[in-house]
Image (cartoon, coloured by chain):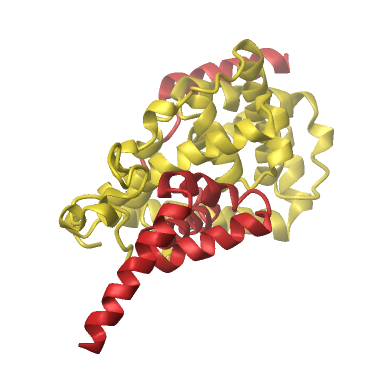
Chain colours: A red, B yellow
Amino acid sequence: MATGLFDKLKMEATFWLGRRLPACDELARVMSESLERRLSARERMRLRLHFLICDYCRRYLGQLRTMRDTARERPEESLPDAALSADARERIRRALAEREE
Amino acid sequence: MIRAQSRAAWSNDFADSNEFMTSPQTTSDSRLSDPSAWLDAHGDYLYRYALVRLRDRSLAEDAVQETLVAALRSPGSFGGRATERTWLVGILKHKIVDHFRKTAREAPFDSDEGKEIEPNHLFMQTGEWVGHWVAAAEPEKASSFGPFEWRATPEDFVARTEFWTVFDGCLKPVPPRLASAFTLREIDGLSSEEICDILGVSVQNLWVMLHRARAHLRNCLEQNWFKPAAGGR
C-alpha cells in the first residue's frame, strides 16, 4: 500500500518535472557542450533535476565521456592493415630523390 | 593471429625509438643523410597516423610525401632533441592542419552540414513526450532503442584493433569537416579555439559539429560494439 503510493507520487513528480524541463534531445546538445565549456548555473541545475528522472540522459553523458577518454588513448598501431602501397612508396622515393639532387 | 603479428611489429617500433633515445648522436647523423631510410623506418607509421586523421588514402599518402620532402629541406631542425619519429610526426601534424585550413577556405561551414547523421529516431518525434528518448517514453521499445548500458570499460577495448575498425567505420558517414573537428578535439585534444581557427568556424558552430558527430558516433558504437545483442563484448 505504502509503496504503491510512493510509486504513484514518484510518477507524478516525474511527469511534472519532465514537462517543465527541456526535452532529452535538447539536453543531449547541452551535455555535449558540457565537454566544451562550463555550463551556466541554470543549465547545471536543469541537467541535475533531469537526471533524477531520466536514467537514459545520465547514461548518455557518461558515454560521451567514455568516448573522449577512449579516443585520447587511441594507440597509433590501431590500423593494422594500413601500410603505404608499393606505388605510393615508389612515388615518394622518387620525389625525395628529385629534391635531393 | 593478425593482432599478435601487429603487436609484435609495434613492439619492434618501440625498440627502434628506444634506440634513438639512448643513442641520438650516432643514429641521427647516419640517418639524416638518407631520407629513403626515413621512408623505410617511419613511412607506414606516418601513413597510419595521417590516415586516422584524414580518412582518405591518397590524402594520407600526399601528407607523408610532403612531410618527408619538408624534412629533407630542413634537416637542421632535427637537433636530436626528440626521436626522429617524433620530429617527423611534428611536421606531419602541420601538413594535416594545412590541409584542413585549405579545405575550410574552399567551402565555408553550412549550419545544416551533418544534420542527416543525427540519430533522431532515438527521440519521440510527436506526441506528449516529443523530444524525449523513445526508450523512456515507450518502455516496451527500450530493448531496441538506446542508450543502453555499456558494461565494458575503456581498458577492455582500447587496445583491441577490432574496436578501432568499428570506430573508423562509424566515422565514415560523418562529413569530413565534422569528422575532422571530432578527431582534432577527441583524439588530438586540441582546444576549441585552435580548432575554430583551423576549420574557420565560430565556436557555436564547432559545438554543433561536435554534438552531431558525438551523437552519431555514440549510437553507431552502441549498435556495433556495445549493445549486448552485438555479442555482449
Residue B185 is situated, as x and y percent measured from the top left of the image, at: 60, 43
Q: Quadrant of the C terminus of chain B?
A: bottom left
Quadrant where the N terminus of chain B lies?
A: bottom left
From the viewer's perspective, is B159 left or right of B79?
A: left
Residue A9: quarter of image: bottom left
Residue furthest to the bottom in view is A2
The front one of B110 and B90 is B110
Considering only vertical position in the picture, is B220 above or below B153? Answer: above
Q: Quadrant of residue A10?
A: bottom left
**In the rendered view, would you say B198 is above or below A95?**
below
Left or right relative to B138: residue A38: right
Identify which residue is drawn at 64% across, 48% down: A36
Q: Position of residue A56 (x, y in %)?
A: 36, 59
Q: Is residue A68 left or right of residue B132?
A: right
B20 vs B217, left or right, is right
**How many labels were placed on the picture?**
0
Residue A85: where, in percent of width, then height? 41, 26
User: In the image shown, does A87 or B67 lie closer to the viewer?
Assistant: B67
Q: Nearer the viewer, residue A83 or A99?
A: A83
The front one of B46 and A31 is A31
* Residue B43 can be seen, yes or no: no
Q: Residue at the location (70% across, 33% down)?
A: B91
Residue A41 visible in the picture: yes
Residue at x 51% of width, y 40% of height: B211
At a point 43% along the width and 51% down the height, the residue shown is B9
Where does the image place residue B62, in percent across and percent down from the top left?
56, 20
